Image (cartoon, rainbow, N blue to C red):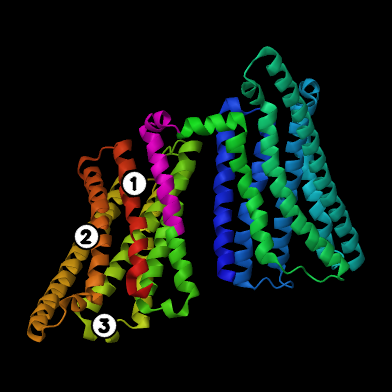
Amino acid sequence: METWFWILGWSLSILTIAGNGSIIFLVCRRRRLRTKSNAFVVSLAVADFCVGLSAVPSLFVCEKTNGCDPEAPFADWVDYLRWLFTYASVTNLCSLVLDRFIAVVKPLKYLLFMTRKRVSQLIFLSWLLSILLVCPYVLMWLVFNDNRSLFLISFWILIILEILSCCSLIFYFGSMLHVVYKHERAARILAKQLRFNHRYLRKNEEKSAVKLMVIVIGLFLVCCACYLRCSLVYIMKDGQPCNDKRFKLPLFVLNSAINPVAYAFFKRDIKEEVERRISLKHFFDCSMETWFWILGWSLSILTIIGNGFIIVLVCSRRRLQTKTNAFVVSLAVADFCVGLSTVPPLFICEKTSGCNPEAPLANRVDYLRWLFGYASVTNLCCLVMDRYIAVVKPLKYLTVMKRRRVSQMIFFSWASSIAIIIPFVLNWLVFENNHLLFFLPLWIYVIFFEFLPCCVLVFCFASMLRVVYKHERAARMLAKQLHFNHHFLFKSEEKSAVKIMAVVIGLFLLAYSCSLRCSLVYLFYTEEILVMIKNIKYLFLFLTLPSTQLPTLCLRGT
């Protein structure tokens, strides 16, 4: 049951973060979407985005570190952070519904009442109220040492506000539904009199607003009812906790995840923008830079999720913590860091300083990307070397590849990647980009981190392929002699290892052939590499990272 809880919780968290992040990006990017009504939408999306970040991930970290012990300081901070963004989501939802209520019920007064200043005041009040609701609990925890009476007073205030928010939302929705019903009835009467198609008149903005509120308010009331029940149980049963977190938390995150979907389908301006962005015409009209960022971000997310899954899987299961899987985890950590340090910092760099070589952030971005890129190369070589010894020298594997030797190889992989970066960093910080001192470590990098790894990987793969061919040939001869089903003999662990290495090494060589060519061009011609070539190199390098996730799932029973 716990496993299903984490799967559902993480899925809803990712959906919440992606959906609300898309709404925030969409509204902030398009000037025509920056309306007063969408200001409430963005404020609610920010609160829901923070809910997605703070609900399940913080609870996961808490349980994996100290088991969410109530005495542990981190557990309290996790709860207070989650409550803060929960209350912010509730208050911002009330502000959004109030805005739609005035627009539908009092349309003539809307423009006079809902000015930009009033919108800013309502949004500020929504966040301020959520902070004020959390402050008493923080003060009681830090100052009054969890005084029981003060805690109950604050808790009753919170319950009253929960009931009040639910009642106000129901009242707003009932009033809007009543107005829409009256307008629809008048439209039908007018249509009969004028013999007009009344269906056109029914498709108005008021009805769309009511549909949006049905989804948003309905889900909120379901989630709030669950929380309100727990609050009453806590008070009436003398402080006994309501232990249904496994059902309550996913429902709570679901409320934040559904909100952006409701905007995308029922809020007209956002719906039109979403349809325009996913239309085929806009899809094919994207520039080369847009395609680069789309592909780069997609591969980044795939790399982070895939390698993170491998790391959690191996570290959480004792039977998977083998010597071979130590190389797998080390490579996954390097690739995970590449996913974090390649496209996201480059995106921030270009959007802030345009990746100007003189900008300090640009140098740090490059060195960080190089560090984890080299670590990925060295760890891949160690993993292939481990499989090479296991296939080519199986009798010596247990004596050669001991746990101490594995630790030494992993340490050497990371140490060598750090060592190759240090000359570039020193040249940048101390020697002010000396031309000679720059090209000396660059030659070392080209030889030992691009050319030599390619040769080593090709040699290891050829040797493994030769051994597997010999074993298969012997197996076929033995099968003919014994009249045995040779298909069973073919499915050996050696053949599986060679298939994995063929995929990993093939993609690695494909990517690094482009990188090696660019390095040689830079060394021999000393000209600045074109931006398009650099982008293509990044994408080819990045394509090798997700490819290591699927093969490692098959490697040694992982």
- Look at the picture and state if 232 lies above or below 49: below
Q: State which quadrant residue 405 falls in.
A: bottom left
Q: Nearer the viewer, residue 319 or 204?
A: 204
- Determine which of the numbered discs, if any, sits on residue 539 in the image: 1
At 79% from the left edge and 40% from the top edge, which residue is drawn?
125
Please identify the quadrant where the N terminus is shown: bottom right
Q: Position of residue 264 (x, y in %)?
A: 58, 37
Label 1 sits on what residue type?
A: Leu
Residue 28 appears in the figure: no
From the viewer's perspective, tell me whether residue 328 is left or right of residue 159. Answer: left
In this rendering, which labeled residue sits more in front, label 1 or label 2?
1
Give the image location of residue 278, x and y in percent. 46, 35
Q: Residues within 10 Å of mark 2 (few under 14, many from 20)?
A: many
- Indicate left or right for 466 with 200 as reference: left
Q: Check disc 1: other Cα within 10 Å, few if <14, some if 14-19, many if 20+.
A: some
**Snapshot quadrant of residue 119:** top right
Q: Which residue is mark 3?
A: 397
Point out the stretch of residues depicted in magenta: 279-305
Residue 515 belongs to the span the image colors magenta? no
Give the Cα separation between the discs numbered 1 and 3.
36 Å
As measured in the structure, the alpha-carbon distance from the residue carrying label 1 to the one carrying label 2 is 19 Å
Residue occupied by mark 2: 454
Q: In the rendered structure, which disc, 3 or 2, sits on the residue that comes first in sequence? A: 3
Residue 319 visible: yes
* Amino acid type at image mark 3: Tyr
Q: Residues within 10 Å of mark 3 (few under 14, many from 20)?
A: some
